[in-house]
Amino acid sequence: MKQPFEELILPYVLEELPPEKRQAFEKEMECNSLLRVRVYETREMLKKLRELPQDTVSRDLSAEILEAIKSEKKQGNPSWLPRLLKAAACLAVLAGAWLVIQSMTGGREDPAAAQGFKWIAAAQETSGAWDGARWGGSGKHTIELTSLALLTLASGKSAGMNSDYDEQIRRAAAYLAAHQDREGIIGEGGICSGYGHAIATCALLEVYRHNPSGGLKRVLDGAIRHLQTSHAASGGWAYQTSSGKSVHPTGSAWALLALKRAAAQGWPCSGPPARLPSQPASRIDLYPWYLLSTEFAGADRSNAVRMLELMKENPASDGCLSAGGQIYSTVLATLTLCAGNPQN
Amino acid sequence: MIRKQKKPDPALLADAEVMKRVRAGHTEAFSVIILRYQNSLLNFFRRLGVYTDAEDLVQECFLRIFRNRMNYRETAKFTTFLYRVGRSVWIDWVRRQARRSSFLTEYEDGMPELNEYCERPAGSGMDAQIALESLPEKLRLVVVMSIYQGMKYAEIAEALDIPVGTVKSRMSIAFDLLRDYMYADAGEKKV
């Protein structure tokens, strides 16, 4: 049982007592040695607690935060993604992906791909994510970059090209799983949340191929369900999960790829979601969508090859490509080509 | 002769005045708030047990404050508003960690547990940090706000939207637990 006044010790030490109570407490202390000891102990404890080191931020965060605020103000601007894709991080990570997939199509071991895996693994944060900001890019696309990097490492593993990155794969998968909300959406609700969710689903499906764990299945069940239910009535998927009817070709391409792979891995994904937005392929970044649509209709690989040639011939014809998206698009297209590859 | 009145440097203004400017559309003035509180927010999250992600949470916190700048009332102390948002950011993080942990448990039973979120920097006072992290989240929050952020009970109550009496009782329970933890720890060491 607590002594009288004992409950006032902490408020007294923290100077939370009103003057009259403080006076009464001090008067009691004068004749109560036990109370004096307890006050001393409490002060010592506080002192010990306050000895913890005070950290400082590794860099001034104001510039990054103000930049993020400005970006948010510009939400809805379609030229946003291309600018962000200028990030060196995107290029570096995607370069790795490109190397991996190129080597996968060749069906042989490739030292360049091994370098790609190595770089990607080394660039992973301890959280399991890949942070564009650390590599000269934006820190706002962690989900997308992490998904692409994970897809690369997991695809390499599936193809028997690497076996040393299980830990990186596990941490990246856990990072994405931790960012799934109750509706099954993997992401942080940003402008490209729909796009990021679709890539993340693709990446986790790739992980699931060689690690069909219960936790991963549950994450994928939710992610795939979201893709199926968020399919716009007019065809396609939105770039942003909350943007409703405004479909995005590249985001749709990723969503279709995810559903295609999910169906191949046993998820009930056949049926209506294969409908696509009826937009003309006037931009390079529409080509992956076009590629996938032909693949769904019967896998006309000659179209895919033609798309790659077009990208090589005319890299500056689209914002995504001029921002470094040639690699991005090449990865996307090559993934599509790989989809029918028995090795994959 | 008419003399132009010089605009005061935002860095010299009180928090409420800076926020008034931010609300009026002077986004750049927000950097004053960031510079003023980025370190104390960082330590707020560190004391709550966030290490690797602490700077990310600081950024997230400032972004949320900016998004909710219209909800800030100048009558309230800015730090109350700041840590109210900080608490919300931290709770979201804790939930993410719980999902992550649950996922990892099921992912691969045979693999060693990942510890990156528990990696504490080496240095003095780590016993105190461990003791702090042994507290339940609700108790830890009031202790951190009081001891490390220097907030009065009334401010904590306002930030957490709980009565002052609840803050007082949580602090009391927390200190009993901390005392037990530190005392037991010392006892074990002696043995």
Image: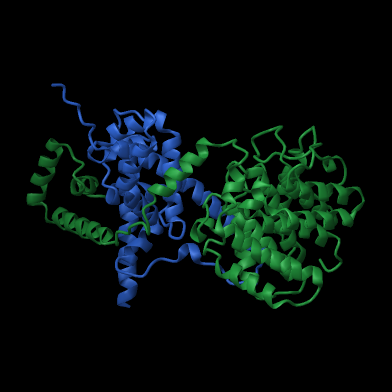
Chain colours: A green, B blue
Picture residue at 69% right of the left edge, 52% below the top: A199
The percent position of residue A343, horizontal first and vertical second, equals: 83, 69
Picture residue at 28% right of the left edge, 36% below the top: B15
Q: In the rendered view, does A144 fall on the left or right side of A59?
A: right
Picture residue at 42% right of the left edge, 57% below the top: B49
Task: Judge by depth and name the residue closer to the eye, B85 or B164.
Answer: B85
The percent position of residue B9, horizontal first and vertical second, equals: 24, 38
Q: Is residue A116 above or below residue A6?
A: below
Picture residue at 71% right of the left edge, 52% below the top: A201
What number of labels is visible? Answer: 0
Q: In the rendered view, does A198 fall on the left or right side of B33?
A: right
Q: Residue furthest right?
A: A298
Q: Is residue A197 visible?
A: yes
Q: Which image quarter holds the C terminus of chain A? A: bottom right
The percent position of residue A27, horizontal first and vertical second, equals: 8, 45
Q: In the rendered view, does A188 fall on the left or right side of B10?
A: right
In which image quadrant can residue A110 be found?
A: bottom right
The percent position of residue A124, horizontal first and vertical second, equals: 56, 65
Task: Judge by depth and name the residue closer to the eye, A144 or B155.
Answer: A144
Q: Is residue A89 above or below residue A198?
A: below
Q: Is residue A3 above or below residue B115?
A: above
Q: Is residue B102 visible?
A: no
